[in-house]
Structure formats: C-alpha cells, structure tokens
Amino acid sequence: MEEGSNPFFMQTHSEILQNKGIRPSVQRVRILKFLMHSKEHPTVEMIFNALLPEMPSLSRTTVYNTVELFKEVGLVQVLDFGRGVLRYDGDLSPHSHFECEKCGAVYDLDIKPQEISKKMPRGFKVHQTYFYVFGLCSQCKKNEKN
Amino acid sequence: MEEGSNPFFMQTHSEILQNKGIRPSVQRVRILKFLMHSKEHPTVEMIFNALLPEMPSLSRTTVYNTVELFKEVGLVQVLDFGRGVLRYDGDLSPHSHFECEKCGAVYDLDIKPQEISKKMPRGFKVHQTYFYVFGLCSQCKKNEKN
DNA sequence: TTTAATTTTGTAATGATTACAAATATAAAA
DNA sequence: TTTTATATTTGTAATCATTACAAAATTAAA
C-alpha cells in the first residue's frame, strides 16, 4: 500500500480502533487486521474459521458483533451478492465488485460507484452506492469452453 | 406504456407465459400481472398478501416457486437491498434502484447499469449488473429537518 | 483491592427461504 | 367422456444465516 491511498498510514490496527473510539480488544484487533489484509471479501464464517486456530476461544457471535461495530464506524463495507451470506470488505477506497457465478470468487473492479449516481430525483440524499457485476471470471470462462 | 418500450406489447399475460414455455395457471397469471403492474418492487410477502383476498387458497410456497420460475426465464429481476428479504421487479428495462433508508421505499433510477460495466478485467464475461443507491427520499429528507 | 462497566461467549430464538410429499388440477390417451 | 399420466399447488417441516439474550470473563475506574 502506498502512503497516499491509505488513510490509516503509519497507524497500528490498535490505533485505528482507538481513533474510532473503540476499545482495542484482542479479538477486535485480530479481526480488523484480518479484514484489512484479506483480498477475498470474507464472510463471518470465513473470518471465524481463519482466526479460530490462533484464538481457540473465539466465538462466532464476537465476529458478528465486531463486524457490525466496524460497519457502524465505517471500518468495513458490507457486500451482499444475494447468496444469503454477507461479505465484508476492509478496503474502503471507492470501487465496485464482481462475483463469479461459477466459482463464487469476488474480484475488485476499478469503477467508482459514487461517480455514477448522477440523475438522482430532486431532493434525494445519497448515502451509499453499490455496483455489483455478476458473470464468469476468466478462469471459469476458459474452463467452460472445454 | 408505449409500444416501443414494451417487449410484450399486445400480449396477454397468459400469452407471455406461453411464449416462455410456461403453462399459464391461474396463480402464475395473477402473480405475473401483479408484478408487471406494481411499482413497489414487492417482496414475496407483499405479493402473497396482495393476492390472498382474491385467491384465498393461495400458498406462500406457490409465490416462492413462481417468482423463482419467472427469474429463471427472465420475467423478473431479483433485487437484494441487504435487508434479508428479496424484492422482485417486473420492469425489465435497464434501470437502477434507490432504497430510502428511512421509509424503505424503493424508487427506480434512470441509470443503465450495464453501460457502467466497462473496465472489466480481461477475459471476464458479464451476465448481470446491479446498481443500488441508498439514502433518503425527498419526503424523508424533508421530515428530517424538522 | 473492590466495584463498575465493557466485552466475549454460548445457547436459544428469529425469520426468510427451501425441501418435500400429499392433494389438486390439467392435459393426453383411449 | 372416462382413464391415466403429468404438472402444479399446497402445507408443513427443515435449513441456515443472523440476532437476542444472559452468564462469564476481562478491563478500567474508584
């Protein structure tokens, strides 16, 4: 990560939490670290399974609580691809998402959704914008031809 | 509806179903009719409650089955605003959606999501694109100021 | 320390959706 | 028609992610 694009440059994960007014408990720091380094837009289950080996007492409920807390203070973006499971993205820079309908992988797209939200009806206030693309990733598209 | 914009111009709802290879049962015709005339992007529950008075034997399961069938043959678009309930849109023209975070109403936006999907990684195949905007509708924005 | 407040944890509820099988309705064959 | 086969509808039971809740554990404050 380069300096310019990282709003949290030079801060520890603990400091990031403190700056948001959140007590940096062990669980919260680990979950934040995981979210900020993950590229896979993990679900609660994925976070839970990834951290369980290093913190055997971790509870699924803690992950749910934490992820909800992070959402409220703007430390994660919640993604809903309509699969009945929510995914979480620690990358807060403006971008969009692609989900492969075959393998389920989620890719980042360099498309800024907020730039699209022109043409809003008069008087409306925009808080959030999401742009989702579904299809086949290059690997699955290649495999399909065989 | 003007002729040019309606791909089903001059067809009865029954004929629309037949053209898709679906037997036009009473339930299916009613549900399709409701979906195509509704502007509120109804949930299964809303469809069920709206039709129950005129068809007291209607089952929620039938609505679920039918809506799933319609999705598969492309008679409805499924919308997921991340509220744990799916909404259905019988308007198949390219457009986007706005959900008011206060009152929950869903509005159509005159933004064509597929035009946005440039900049796709090489080799990817796009099947579907969704653009969701969240915020306050003009009424709720007005009320908030008081 | 002792006390108070916060956080974590496990279990139990919730609620939309799906699975499934029996009942009903429709179409095809005789 | 009647009979038979097929498709559809219905109601109930299961599923499963998420939420509610209260007890246990941890941390901070007095």
Image: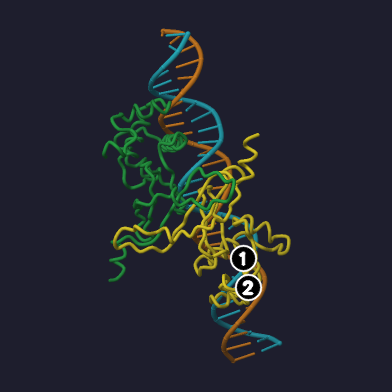
Chain colours: A green, B yellow, C orange, D cyan
Residue B104 horizontal/vertical position (percent): 60, 47
Q: Amino acid at mark 2?
A: His
Q: Which residue is mark 2?
A: B13
CA–CA distance between discs 2 and 1? Answer: 9 Å
Residue at 60 percent across and 63 percent down: it is: B62
Q: Nearer the viewer, residue B16 or A7?
A: A7
Neighbor class of circle 2 (other Cα within 10 Å; few <14, some 14-19, many 20+) is some
Tags 2 and 1 touching, CB below 8 Å: yes
Q: Are marks 2 and 1 on the same chain?
A: yes
Query: What's the chain of the residue with tag 1?
Result: B
| Mark linked to residue B36 | 1
Does residue A79 appear left or right of residue B30 in this picture? left
Residue B117 horizontal/vertical position (percent): 40, 59
Q: Nearer the viewer, residue D22 or A5?
A: A5
Residue A90 horizontal/vertical position (percent): 36, 40
Q: Amino acid at mark 1?
A: Met
Q: Nearer the viewer, residue A119 or B5?
A: A119
| Residue positioned most to the right | B53
Residue at 53 percent across and 67 percent down: it is: B69
Mark 2 residue element: helix
